[in-house]
Image (spheres, rainbow, N blue to C red):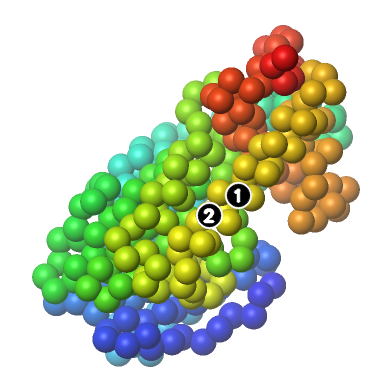
Amino acid sequence: MREVPPVEDLGEGLWSIPVPVPHNPIGFTYVYVLSATGGPVLIDTGWNHDDSWTALVEGLARTGHGVDEVQGAVVTHFHPDHSGLTGRLREASDAWIAMHPRDIAILENLAGQAPEERAASMVAQMTRAGFPAEDVDAFRASPTVFRSPAIPDRTLGDGEPLDIPGVALRAVWTPGHTPGHLCLHLADRDLLFTGDHVLPRITPHVGQFPLDSTKGDPLGDFLSSQARTGRLPDAERLLCLPSHEQRFTGLPERTRAIIDHHEERLARMADLLRKGPTTLWELTSGLEWRRSWEDMRVSARHMATSETAAHLRTLEERGLVERDGSMELPRWATIT
């Protein structure tokens, strides 16, 4: 677990509240609080856990506000460490919740599926990816299935301003980490809330779901979004406020570094695939990860495999690799 930093006054009515993610190496998610006419506005809400809720309520008290005063929350994306407390917040304050429509659509789809149905789908995907039987059985015995939080009641699209007097906050659509990920630009203060899109030290997870889907190109979208973010007006001057780690500047350099990292990864995969047709599991298990493959839990292996799948989709879109074999066990190889 990462050490959770204190609540911090960032000046001019802006605060950061680190909301813990219990029993998770991510440690915490920064929830930002903006003072506004009609009550504070949150950027993200945090993980759905009693300890997380207590940290959010106590953090708001440090800013001089009660949770019942919150008028709304803008959620950068649907992942549970960002959106998990939307339901409890709405119950406590009748706050509106805003999110990009593409992520709202994902939550609506998840809410319409039974957990057993989604777990069965993941088992089928892992089988087609070539996971060994012991991994599939381990997942089947203890499935990790994301539970949908409250559905937002406001949409916020690319370039749209937040409809709050005195807050010049504008949405910047940055798909990739999720289809509807948003950064939020506070132009009059040279601030950019980057969510998980741009982090100062690590790169966020970009996965393909379902694993063997031939639709979309999430990594391609992510790379385009990184380049676009690095070209924002006065990007070099912006102070970036991410959801994890610490604040940073040098946005153009950081986005270039993230793009370069993925281009190197793409080149490495294309090189490995020259050895012949390879299953998704074989390719993923042969790559380097921050933690050794042997030490990964099945859920972490699934996430790593989805990231590999996203890279393969980009290589397919670029005409560099192709898949063959049966639908039950597809394989990928470099196009010669």
Q: Are marks 2 and 1 in contact (CB under 8 Å)?
A: yes
| Mark 2, other Cα within 10 Å: few <14 / some 14–19 / many ≥20 | some
In the image: residue 254, left or right of residue 270: left
* In-front residue for pair 320/294: 320
In three-dimensional space, the C-alpha distance between marks 2 and 1, rounded to whole angstroms, equals 6 Å
Extreme-top residue of the structure: 326
Quarter occupied by the N terminus:
bottom right
Quarter of the rendering occupied by the C terminus = top right
CA neighbours of label 1 inside 10 A, class few (<14), some (14 to 19), many (20+): few
User: Considering depth in this image, is 260 or 216 the residue closer to the camera?
Assistant: 260
Q: Nearer the viewer, residue 231 or 243?
A: 231
What residue is drawn where x is 44% and y is 42%? 224
Q: Is residue 316 above or below residue 144?
A: above
Which of these two is toward me, 175 or 134? 175
Q: On screen, 181 above or below 326? A: below
The quadrant in which residue 191 appears is bottom left
Q: On the rendered structure, is 40 left or right of 32?
A: left
Q: x and y percent of residue 201 in the render?
A: 61, 66
What residue is pinned by disc 2? 256
Which amino acid lies under the numbered mark 2 shown in the image of this protein?
Arg
Give the percent coordinates (x, y) of residue 59: 42, 83
The residue lying furthest to the left in this view is: 165
Residue 17: quadrant of the picture: bottom left
Do we see residue 334 in this rendering? Answer: yes
* Residue 49 visible: no
Which residue position is annotated with label 1? Answer: 260
Please determine whether, in this image, residue 283 is positioned above or below residue 319: below
